[in-house]
Amino acid sequence: MRASGWRRWMGRGVVAALGVGLATAALAQSLPRLPQDFTFPRGQGSPGTVTFTHRTHVDPRQPDCTACHPGLFKILEKGIPAEGGPVGHASLPAGRQCWACHNGKNAFGPANCLACHRPG
């Protein structure tokens, strides 16, 4: 291969690599940066602490914050329900807060305590 042909081939490779790199960077920036995990204060009589993680509640292929925010939970105040007050089992009969989805139909229900509460 002549020197000019080799340079042309290398130049195309560099351009292709830059294109892939830029596309990957653009994709990474288009995905939402999820908030850090949040551990709720342990309530009286609770079998353990509850740590909420967005990773298990948000589909990264189709992130939709509006499923919970602002209707169920405030978006800028961690762990605060839209109606105020603490998160807890008192909202279970009304199907609010966590129980809007964790009702045994859409997601596991309140009978599975250790799915959320971690002893310790």
Image (tube, rainbow, N blue to C red):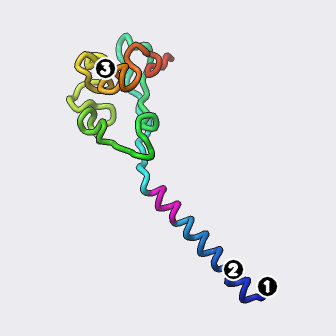
- Name the kind of residue labelled 1 in the image: Met
The residue that mark 2 highlights is 9
Q: Secondary structure at mark 1?
A: loop
Residue 73 is a magenta residue: no
Mark 1 and mark 3 lie on one chain; the one further toward the N terminus is 1
22 above or below 48? below
Q: Which one is closest to the eye, mark 1 or mark 3?
A: 1
Q: Which one is closest to the eye, mark 2 or mark 3?
A: 2
Q: Secondary structure at mark 3?
A: loop
How far across and how far down the image is residue 60, in percent?
45, 44
Query: Horizontal placement of 63 versus 83: left or right?
Result: right
The residue that mark 3 highlights is 88
- Name the kind of residue labelled 2 in the image: Trp
Q: Are marks 1 and 2 in contact (CB under 8 Å)?
A: yes
Task: Single out the residue that lies furthest toward the left.
Answer: 83
How far across and how far down the image is residue 69, in percent?
28, 39
Q: Quadrant of residue 9?
A: bottom right
On-image quarter of the N terminus:
bottom right
The residue that mark 1 highlights is 1
Residue 24 is a magenta residue: yes
Q: CA distance from mark 2 to mark 3?
A: 64 Å
Task: Single out the residue that lies furthest toward the top.
Answer: 45
Main secondary structure found in the magenta portion: helix
Q: As rendered, which of 100 and 76 lies closer to the eye? A: 100
Q: Which mark is residue 31?
A: none
**Residue 105 shows in this picture:** yes
Q: As rendered, which of 86 and 110 lies closer to the eye? A: 110
* Image point (42%, 44%), residue name: 34
Query: Horizontal placement of 112 versus 79: left or right?
Result: right
- Graded by Cα atoms within 10 Å as few (under 14), some (14 to 19) or many (20 or more), the crowding at tag 2 reads few
